[in-house]
Each structure stands twice: as C-alpha cells, then as structure tokens.
Amino acid sequence: MTLRGSILAGTLLLGVVACGKDEVPVDPPVCGNSKLPEVHSLWQCGPTLDFTPINSYQGEFADVVQDREDAVALIDGRCTGTLIAASAGPVVVTAGHCVGLGDRSLLVFNFEDNPDGDPLVTEGSVIEQSLDPDYALIQLDELPAATPVLLTTQATERLAIIQHPRGHPKVIAEGNFLASCHQLVYYTDLDTLVGSSGAGVLNRQGYLLGIHTDGDCDEEGHGTNRGWTAEAIVEASPYLQSTDIADR
C-alpha cells in the first residue's frame, strides 16, 4: 500500500471510530435556520428523568426557588402556568396550545408533596391566546398568596423549570442554556414531559426568561427542549407592556 493509501485508510478508520456507539452527544445547531422547528412530543433529555419534588429540592437554585414556586399552578390538570407581574395586574402565563381564548380554566396552586403554602383552587378567564408565539394569559378570579414572578431578557448558563409533568405534584428540573434566537430559547439536559407545557423557564436569579412549549430530546441525550421568550410574549401581548420586562 502506498503512503497516500495508508493515510486514506487511517482517515476512514478514524471516521468509523468517531461515529461509534460511544460517541458523546453534542449540542445540535438550533439557530442556523429561521424556520420554526417541528413540534415533537415532550420528553426527557438523557437516560434518566431528573425531577426533584419541589419541597425536597436542595440544588443550585435553592436560594431562589422557594420564593418562586408558590406562583406555579397546575392548569386544567394538563398544563403548567406561572403567575407573573404585570403593570395592569398579575396574570398567569402558560402555553397557547393548552387553552382557548375565552376559556374558563381551573387552576390549582400548591399542588405538591409536603405542601408548605396555602392551597388554592380557583378559576380564571383566558384573556389572550396565540400559537405564534405559543402563549396564553389567564386572569384569575382569586389571586394566590404568592409573589408574582418578574420577567427578564437575561439568560444564564443554568436554567430551571418548576412544573407539573403529567399533571403530577410540582417538581423542578435543571439544565443548560444552549441558545436564544428567532424568539425561542433552547436548553439541553432539562427534562420535561406532557403537562410541563406553559411552565416558566427561570434564569439563575429566578426570573422568567420564557415559557416551555416544545420538547425534542431523546433518552440518548440528543436534541433540545425549547420555549418562547418572555420578550416575544410581551411584544405580541396587548395586555403586557414593555415596562413589564427588563434586564435583570
């Protein structure tokens, strides 16, 4: 075999090894195409489902999570929402595919293991609903004893989502910020399931960067989950104002 042939064979061998089963998953490109990604089922990122019951959590976000979790509600037994601060009055933000405009939704606050807050079951009216961006606003008949979460445009390296996966008691999951583009925020290794739609994506300071709407992870650790940014929602909303979101 010639020297050129040996080099070519070695190159091919390295390519086979690089594509083997032990290849480490890499973060997929998400911002190269302005076309919105196809919506897939909501699923876990990686081989384990890393949820922690909210009142057992002692992780990286422990310094802020207890001040935020009382604002999170289970909506109609099938989605999650967060009470947010707004100049016109607090409202619950969730995913637009969870509800219809004018719907009367049932919201349950402090549905969690070992609840540490005042439970509240109340109804609310859907005053805004959209699929692009995918969001809805619900005006409550009765406000919970919770501090509304502030909106932000500032991403941090680590993100967290407080959620009701499959309508179960409240849990938290953490993951890594990947990118923000085309009004979407992408994150990796941050588990969600059906029922997590509409949950707030929190930055490290506990402010709401976006709402979770779509999952595209798999159990081998490939893919990303994603949601619409708070900035995109404010721009689309007649109710919310530009002063409701700031750099924090």
Image: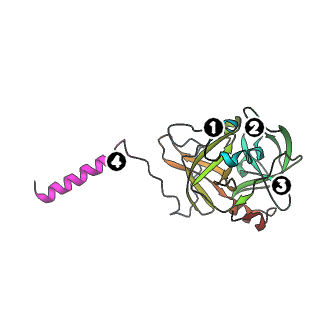
Residue at x 44%, y 51% (from the top left corner): 26
Residue type highlighted by circle 3 = Pro
Residue type highlighted by circle 2 = Gly
Residue type highlighted by circle 4 = Cys
Q: Is residue 39 magenta?
A: no
Dominant SS in magenta: helix
Structural distance between the alpha carbons of marks 3 and 2:
21 Å
Circle 4 residue: 19
Query: Can you name the residue that lies furthest to the front here?
Result: 63
Along the viewing direction, whichever of 96 and 163 lies nearer the viewer: 163
Circle 2 residue: 77
Q: Which numbered disc, 1 or 3, marks the residue that appears first in the sequence?
A: 1
Q: Is residue 32 left or right of residue 164?
A: left
Residue type highlighted by circle 1 = Thr
Q: Are marks 4 and 3 in contact (CB under 8 Å)?
A: no
Q: Which numbered disc, 2 or 4, marks the residue that appears first in the sequence?
A: 4
Circle 3 residue: 90
Q: Which numbered disc, 2 or 1, marks the residue that appears first in the sequence?
A: 1
Q: Which residues are magenta?
A: 1-24
Q: How packed is label 1: few (under 14 Cα within 10 Å), some, or many (20 or more)?
A: some
Mark 3 or 2: the one toward you: 3
Structural distance between the alpha carbons of marks 2 and 1:
19 Å
Q: Are marks 3 and 2 in contact (CB under 8 Å)?
A: no
Q: Could you tell me which secondary element the residue under label 2 belongs to?
A: loop
Circle 1 residue: 52
Q: Are marks 4 and 1 in contact (CB under 8 Å)?
A: no
Q: Which numbered disc, 4 or 1, marks the residue that appears first in the sequence?
A: 4
